Image (spheres, rainbow, N blue to C red):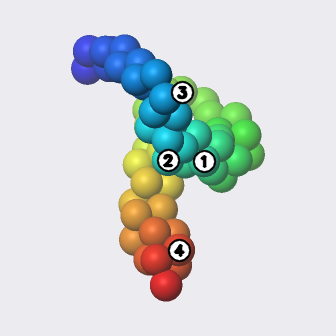
Amino acid sequence: MPPPEDSPALAGEPPCNGCAEPFIRTLKEQCLWVKLYDDLEELRHAVIEFLERYNSQWLIATAT
């Protein structure tokens, strides 16, 4: 998978990061900081499970 391209926010448009920053912090708190993974594949699996849970449960809870 190629690395993502940089896409800096436009001047005066800080809300662009406003959605990503809380999500990244939640990912770190719920997935990355709580366990030491044996290898990259185990970490990848944990992140996929987190994303499925986040998209099916967390987003619904915050929408109501």
Q: Position of residue 46 (x, y in %)?
A: 50, 47
Q: Are marks 2 and 1 in contact (CB under 8 Å)?
A: yes
Q: Quote the CA–CA distance across marks 2 and 3.
A: 29 Å
Amino acid type at circle 2 is Cys
Q: Residue at x 37, y 15 (%)?
A: 6
Tell me which label, 4 or 2, sits earlier in the chain.
2
User: Which type of secondary structure does the marked residue at label 1 adopt?
Assistant: helix
Amino acid type at circle 1 is Pro
Read off the residue under disc 4.
62
Read off the residue under disc 1.
22
Amino acid type at circle 4 is Thr
Within the image, what quadrant is residue 9 found in? Answer: top left
Labels 3, 4: front one: 4
Read off the residue under disc 3.
39
Q: Quote the CA–CA distance across marks 4 and 2.
A: 13 Å
Within the image, what quadrant is residue 16 found in? Answer: top left
Tell me which label, 1 or 4, sits earlier in the chain.
1
